[in-house]
Image (cartoon, rainbow, N blue to C red):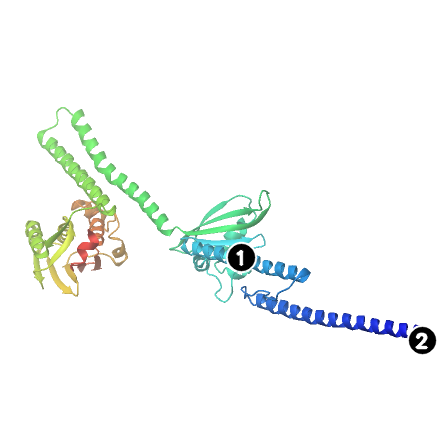
Amino acid sequence: MKEIQLLNELYIFIILILSIVTIVLIRYTVSLRTYLKEFMKVSKDISNKEFDSRVRSQMSGEMGEFAKNFNSMIDTINFTIKDITNKNTQLQSIMKSVSHGILAIDTKGRILLINELAKEMVEGDELLLPEGKSIRQFIKNKIVLESILYNMSSENSVVVQKNISKDIIYKIKIDPVYFKNTDAVIGFIINIEDVTDYVKLENMRKQFVANVSHELKTPLTSIKGFVETLKMTENLDTDTKTRFLGIIENETTRLSRLIDDILLLSTVENKVKKKVEKVDLFEIFEEIHEIVGYIAKDKNIKIDYQFENQDIDLWEYSGYIRQILLNIIENAIKYTGKNGNIKIRQYVKKDKVFIEIQDNGIGIPKEDIDRVFERFYRVDKARSRSVGGTGLGLAITKHMVKALNGDIKLESELGVGSKFTIELPFNREFSKKVS
């Protein structure tokens, strides 16, 4: 009996132990399931970029350590993403502010980075997102594409200048990017710069120097020749000597006028600060009319003028308006034949005053109209020199008008005559702009 009783007690003890273990396992399983649900929820939040989510269950032991490490990992990821985002924002801001087109590609020609200006300059395919695409797919400008492809094999920086079209010139610089502390090329940075204006200015500078040299050389050669003749010829008659000295005087005057015009043009082009003053437009015109009246009278040229408003005051740099009117009216007289007519009309529209100067002179061929404001450009070189022109008058006039925030236009027909229209602001705000 005792053995049976002992055996029953043993069974009861085993059942009790198993019951306790079962209860513990059930509770542990329930807790583990709860923890797993918490981890699954947080991981789902993280995958949805909700980086503020954390494992909040109070855990102990290994699960508690795991939860702590899991939350720490989320913090690290969150910090890293914010840091990358900030750096990317800074990079994008820098890329936008750069005045050149910037393009980064890998060694296979895949686009890694490109700014908006570069997209325009390479005529990028608007239907494609450029990042990850081949430059062959994205770049539609063949000249730019061929320039990049041709120089991608170089291990040194390459600079090429290309005429993209008749009026656009690009400078393309291709720099290889090396892996840190190695000679392995991992990509290229392409810098595309529009140098059209620079090239035009450089060409203008070269042309200007050449023209100045030519314009100075002609009278100097003439002066030198006649001076040598006078020195070498002892028994030169008085009339011939006087004629030679007259030619030398004329050439010297021409040189002096040319140098004065060059200096004046340089002053206007370089926007040298001058005193701003208020002037009476009609009063200035009357002064000019009196000056050119003698020249017009010699050719029996009639000057008619009509001023819609004689009480217009303008803000200007000292002498600019006087010089503008003198240059245009004097030109009209020079290139109008005897018994000709010049009509001058002034009128006002809103805050602008317009001055039209029209003649019935020789006129200008259609193909030359757009070039008459260029330095040293002459429609008829022989006639221009014979009337004392330096080839700089209209260039100076245009720069002066532009300096006063105005505009000048020309209409002309060969054999019929020319009309210059000068447009100038006269509102009070102008004084602030030019001061």
Choose the circle earlier in sequence order: 1 or 2. Answer: 2
Q: Residues within 10 Å of mark 1 (few under 14, many from 20)?
A: few
Q: How many marks?
A: 2
**Image quarter hosting the N terminus:** bottom right
Asked whether residue 135 appears in the rendered view, the answer is no
User: CB of mark 1 within 8 Å of CB of mark 2?
Assistant: no
Alpha-carbon span between mark 1 and mark 2:
74 Å
Picture coordinates of residue 417, whole percent (x, y): 17, 59
- Specify the amino acid type for callout 1: Phe
Residue 51 screen position, x and y as percent = 54, 64
Residue at left 63%, top 69%?
40
* Residue at 29% in and 41% down: 209
Report helix, strand or loop for mark 1: helix
Q: Which mark is residue 79?
A: 1
Give the residue type at disc 2.
Answer: Met
User: Residue 211, how many percent across, how many down?
Assistant: 28, 42
